[in-house]
């Protein structure tokens, strides 16, 4: 994809968000961070504040299975756990799936290859 196409896609996504007409899922890689933030917030609302992986409240801790799992923090970016809620996406299609705890995201990456 060339630079012009990327810029057009970003602008279209921003216009969609600003207009309040965001449709989920979105393409994670082709979307500006500000649009991904809006998508994450919309997923949180649609999921009624629950993690789409462990089904526990996003304002609290993940499930015991996820909390007790050994996470190798060295395989993740240093900023991985700076933000408690992540926008989960499929690494094959780049389409978003839902909002998850940061630790659930790490768990899925490390143990489930997602």
Image: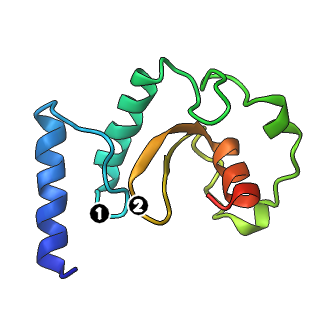
Percent of width and height locating residue 93 = 41, 63
The image's mark for residue 58 is none
Q: Quadrant of the C terminus?
A: bottom right
Percent of width and height locating residue 59 = 61, 23
Indicate the quadrant where residue 66 lies.
Answer: top right
Circles 2 and 1, Cβ within 8 Å, touching? The answer is yes
Indicate the quadrant where residue 53 lies.
Answer: top right
Percent of width and height locating residue 64 = 84, 30
Give the SS element for disc 2: loop
* Horizontal side, residue 56 vs residue 43: left or right: right
* Horizontal side, residue 74 vs residue 21: left or right: right
> Residue at point 71% right, 56% down?
112
Q: Furthest-bottom residue in view?
A: 2
Q: Furthest-top residue in view?
A: 48
> Residue at point 11% right, 64% down?
8
* Horizontal side, residue 91 vs residue 113: left or right: left
Give the SS element for disc 1: loop
Indicate the quadrant where residue 72 lies.
Answer: bottom right
Crowding near the residue tagged with mark 2, few <14, some 14–19, many ≥20 C-alpha atoms within 10 Å: some
Q: Earlier in the sequence, mark 2 or mark 1?
A: 1
Q: Quadrant of the N terminus?
A: bottom left
Q: Nearer the viewer, residue 83 or 113?
A: 113
Percent of width and height locating residue 30 = 29, 63
Q: Is residue 94 above or below residue 106?
A: below
Q: Is residue 91 above or below residue 61?
A: below
> Residue at point 32% right, 56% down?
27
Residue at image mark 1 = 30
Measured in 3D between alpha carbons, the distance from the residue under mark 2 to the one under mark 1, in whole angstroms, is 8 Å
> Residue at point 76% right, 56% down?
111
Residue at image mark 2 = 94
Crowding near the residue tagged with mark 1, few <14, some 14–19, many ≥20 C-alpha atoms within 10 Å: some
């Amino acid at each position: 994809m060339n630079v012009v196409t990327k810029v057009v896609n970003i602008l279209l996504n921003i216009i969609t968000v600003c207009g309040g007409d965001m449709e989920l899922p979105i393409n994670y890689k082709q979307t500006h961070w500000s649009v991904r933030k809006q998508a994450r917030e919309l997923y949180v609302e649609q999921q009624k504040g629950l993690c789409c992986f462990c089904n526990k409240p996003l304002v609290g801790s993940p499930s015991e299975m996820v909390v007790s799992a050994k996470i190798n923090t060295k395989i993740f970016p240093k900023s991985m756990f700076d933000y408690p809620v992540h926008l989960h996406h499929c690494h094959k299609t780049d389409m978003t799936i839902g909002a998850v705890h940061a630790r659930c995201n790490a768990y899925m990456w490390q143990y489930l290859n997602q």
